[in-house]
Structure formats: structure tokens, C-alpha cells
Image (tube, rainbow, N blue to C red):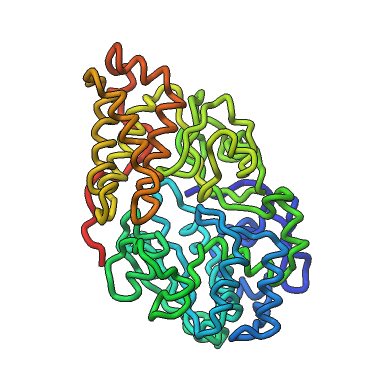
Amino acid sequence: MNSPTTAPPTGGHGAPPPDGSSGVRLLAGWYATGRPATLADHLGRYGPPPVTAAGGGPASAGLIEAVEAAGLTGRGGAGFPTARKLRAVADRRRRAVVVVNAVESEPASRKDRFLLAVAPHLVLDGAVLAAGAVGADTVHVCLPRDPSGGYRRLDAALEERRRAGLDRVRLLPHALPHAYVSSESTSLVRWLGGGPARPQGSPPRSHERGVDRRPTLVSNAETLAHLALIARYGPDWFRRSGTREEPGTLLVTVSGAVASPGVLEAASGTPLTTLLDRAGGPAEPLRAVLLGGFAGTWLPAEHLRTPLARRDLAPLGAAPGAGVVVALPRSACPLTETARMLAYLAAHSARQCGPCRLGLPAVAEDFAALAAGRADPVLWSRLSHRVALLPDRGACRHPDGAARLAASALHAFADDVDRHLTEGPCPAAHEPPRIPVPPATPPEAWR
């Protein structure tokens, strides 16, 4: 994964904070050195994290108020206000638990594993600060179970902190099965409680009774890293970057038909064209971009000047999601690429409810037939009907995301749909895939 090429800001303990106008904050140390930060590097740049009062004292309330004033929202995809989640757990007034969600099971995203690889102590600082704010004595850090070495690197960072006596809470690493739905918040809670890493659709909610039946804060790794910087530099500093409605920066994984795919940090509201240019520019003329990953939305190329912000993308039926931008070249068949993603999503469902066991596989099969030009007289009406039946019926939001992807493809590539239905598959449908998609095989394990 390539790193960005913009010149880094300066900052550090006793020095000015990372410059919000540059759009580089979380990755400032990486830009400055080009290597992962050790604990010594981290403390030299930022100093020790501020102290919060465990159990909801004044300092804890002050941190929640600062996060609220900063306008920080979750960077895991949903964009829920972070202060509201903190307060919901803190208000339970019982010993709580914090869960760091770095499972990142979206195939097109690399931001959380990149952040943990180059700046692990920002994430861990944020988790410890959040624990103090909600009255937690344990932090569970959840990563995917894969051979990338992420768990080993995290364990080394935790050992550095143990030796330094830095933290007053327990920090425990975990490697979860790498299924698509394993990163859903209730999947993490269920797995940490000894169950399978599948979503739990029924109440109570995690903030009411989660891990060990205690109030539980589940927060994305990037979100907690932002929290660590807000605790140091304050909400006004955080708001110097981004837009009034959506302040701060976000990590974006840019891939597909660009010269230098990688993880970028950019201010909220940065135009999509700017992000593509920072990733080396399009490698060939583009047909569209996929925003938000496999559960996201196709946006045709004529909208590439749109800012990456919810307010600007909402009229187009899109959202930033977890910060994924996949560039699709004109030479690719968009229906074939979408069909492969839908097949993967169908294979990686939890199979706990009707929409995932029956509806999603049926939609994937119909879309594959459309992409291959195997149209029967009722394919279009049947596919449209099935896509409309998926949302708001599952135990989790997995079928909703698949429906969003399918519906956006049918809309954005309507001309291709018509040609495939009437004339058979386009020549590009027989070409090698242009977007990497893991094999459409069910997960080997849920525990």
C-alpha cells in the first residue's frame, strides 16, 4: 500500500499541533519519517495522553463535551456522533467495556490496518481515553485473523506500553474470523462473549448490555485516533479542517484504475477528483467510482467534482461510508464487476435470516445472469423486485448494503443493462476483472 506524497506538517509535544489546513493529522508522523511510530516516537511527537477520570468524573465529562464540540462522527461507515455514543455508555453508571473495531472486513478498505501499522499508539491512546470517559477498566482491540502481521505488530505496541506503565486499564488484543459481517459491532460483542462472529439482531443494544453483560462502547480505530488528538489540541483545532457540518479529516482508501493506489488522509469535503489526483491520477479514462465499498454506491464520472461529504453526496444517493473510493475504467464492464461483488456478499452473509439465506443469493444469481447476457423475459422485473425486498428486513444491515450496491448499478449503468438484456453481454464482460474481489466462498469459521 503506497503512502501519500503531500508534504507533512510539523507537530509534537511542546510544538504546534498537526496543521489542519494540510489535511494531514493522523498520518503526520508517517509523513515525517516514512516509518511506523514506536512508543518513543509517539511520545516525542505528542507527549503522554491527557488523563481522564475513570468512572465519569469531571475530566471524563470534559472529554465528552470536547468531542461533542468538535463534531467528531464515527469513521467506520455509519457516521454516528461519537459524543452521543460515549455519553450513552457513561450514563449507564456501571463498569463499562471499550471495544476497538479494527476488523475492517470491507475488501476495498485498508485504512484501519494502515493506521494501526504506522500510528498504533494514537489509536490506543484514544481507546484508553475513551475508557476513562465511560468508566471502563478493559479495552478489547479486535483485528482480523489474517496473515498480514497486523496482530503481531499490535501485540508489540501493547508490550511497549506495558513496559512503560503507560495505561491504567487492561488492553487485550483479539484476532477474529475475517468474514464480511464480522466487523459489525454486535458481531464483535457476540464473539468476545464466546459466541460466533455473527451479528446479533435482537436487543439489548451494546451500550446497555454488551461484553460480559456490561455497558459497551464499540468504536472504529480511526475514530479513536481522532479522539486522542481532540483530547490534546481541542475542538477548535479539530474544526480547522473539513467543513462546518462535517469537520476534521478522514482516511480514504483509493484503488482501482489509479496510478498509485493507497491510503490518503484528506479533509472532509475534499473533491473526489482531488483524491484521485493524489493517488497518481486515473490510469485510464474513468466510467465511474464506487463510494463506500461493496455495500456502497456507484457514482458516474460526471459527478467526480462532488466533495466527499454526506451533505453533497446525499442528493446523489451516495455517502462517504468508511472512506472507500474505487475507480472504474471505461474499458471494464460495470455489470460484471458488480455481479462479482454481489456473489461475494451473498457468500459472506451470516445466514441467520431470510434476506441473507434466500434473498441475497437470488439477487446475486439474477445479477450474474444479467452480466452474462443470459436474460429471460422476466429477469429485469424479477431482479428489481428482489432488490427492493432486501432492505430493512435482516438481523443486520448486510442485505441493505447489497441492495444499495445492486440498485445503484442498475441506475448508474442503465444503458449497459439495456444492452445486456437486448443484445447480450458486452465485449468487456469477457475480459479479466478490473476490481479485486475475494473468492465468493463462505467463511471457514465464525469462531
| Residue at image point 50% right, 71% down | 217
Image spot of residue 433 (x, y percent):
33, 32
Where, by quadrant of the figure, is residue 405 drawn? top left
| Residue at image point 37% right, 55% down | 396
Viewer-closest of 35 and 313: 313
- Image vertical order of residue 318 relative to residue 6, above or below: above
**Is 186 on the left-hand or right-hand side of 357?**
right
* Residue 262 visible in the displayed image: no
- Of all residues shown, which one is farthest toward the top? 423
| Residue at image point 63% right, 62% down | 29
Viewer-closest of 391 and 331: 391
- Image vertical order of residue 406 relative to residue 15, above or below: above
| Residue at image point 59% right, 35% down | 315
**Is 402 on the left-hand or right-hand side of 272?**
left
Could you tell me which quadrant the C terminus lies in? bottom left
How many numbered markers are drawn?
0
Image spot of residue 357 (x, y percent):
23, 48
Image spot of residue 198 (x, y percent):
31, 62
Where, by quadrant of the figure, is residue 225 drawn? bottom right
Image spot of residue 254 (x, y percent):
51, 42
Viewer-closest of 44 and 352: 352
* Residue 135 visible in the displayed image: yes
